[in-house]
Structure formats: structure tokens, C-alpha cells
Amino acid sequence: MLIVIVIIGILAAALVPRLIDVQGRARDTKRKADMKTIISALEMYMLDNSSYPSAHAANPNTYNGSQRRSSIMDSTLWFPTLDTYLSSIPKDPLNVT
């Protein structure tokens, strides 16, 4: 009986860390799928418009020279240009509300 309990304990010890990490791996898989979707939308935009969307072109009212880096990094400025290519804007699965 003691041997059976030890074997079950060993199996449980090997299985628990894998089960704990399942949610993290699922979020990472969702992020990778979202990135592939965004890449596909950008490529379709490129084929239709012969250029990629730029942040300041998408929302010229928020752009000036001193904001160049933050504007380019802020996806909310150029995501609206992809509305016709995306069914919805992907959100980080960790921060979904």
C-alpha cells in the first residue's frame, strides 16, 4: 500500500507544475494567434494601399514631431485603419475586461 501511495505522490508532483502553467501557455498561444492575425491584416492593407499604415496618417491631430516615437508605438492610432481587415481589435488576454 505504501508503494502505491509513493507512486501516486510522484505522479502528482510531476503533474501539478504542468497544470499550473496551462493558463500561461494558453495566454501565450492567444497572443501568438493575435499577432498572426495582425500581420495578415497589415499584409492585406499593404497589398491594397501599396504601403503600411502610419500612426500620424491615421490620426494627424495627435501627431507632432516630438511625439513621433510614442505615436508609432501606440497601436490605437493605426489600428482603426485596419478595421476593414480585422473583425475585432485583439486585446491582451491577461488584461481582458
Image (cartoon, rainbow, N blue to C red):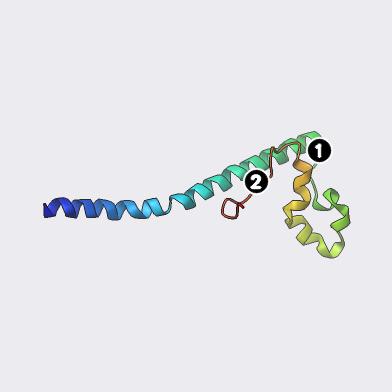
Residue 78 pos. (x, y %)? 77, 48
Residue under the image location 80 percent in, 52 percent down: 55
Report whether 24 appears left or right of 91: left
Quadrant of residue 88 in the image?
Answer: top right
Q: Residue furthest bottom?
A: 66
Residues under numbered marks 2 and 1 in contact, where contact means CB atoms less than 8 Å apart: no
**What residue is pinned by disc 1?**
50
Q: Secondary structure at mark 1?
A: loop
- Nearest to the observer: residue 82 or residue 5: 5
Is residue 78 visible in the rendered structure shown here? yes
Amino acid of disc 1:
Ser
Q: Badge 1 local density, few (<14 within 10 Å), some, or many (20+)?
A: few
Q: Residue furthest front?
A: 97
Residue under the image location 79 percent in, 45 percent down: 53
Residue 19 pos. (x, y %)? 38, 51
User: Which numbered disc flags the more N-terminal residue, 2 or 1?
Assistant: 1
**What residue is pinned by disc 2?**
90
Is residue 52 visible in the rendered structure shown here? no
Residue under the image location 83 percent in, 48 percent down: 58
- Nearest to the observer: residue 37 or residue 3: 3
Q: Badge 2 local density, few (<14 within 10 Å), some, or many (20+)?
A: some
Report whether 27 appears left or right of 4: right
Residue 15 pos. (x, y %)? 32, 51
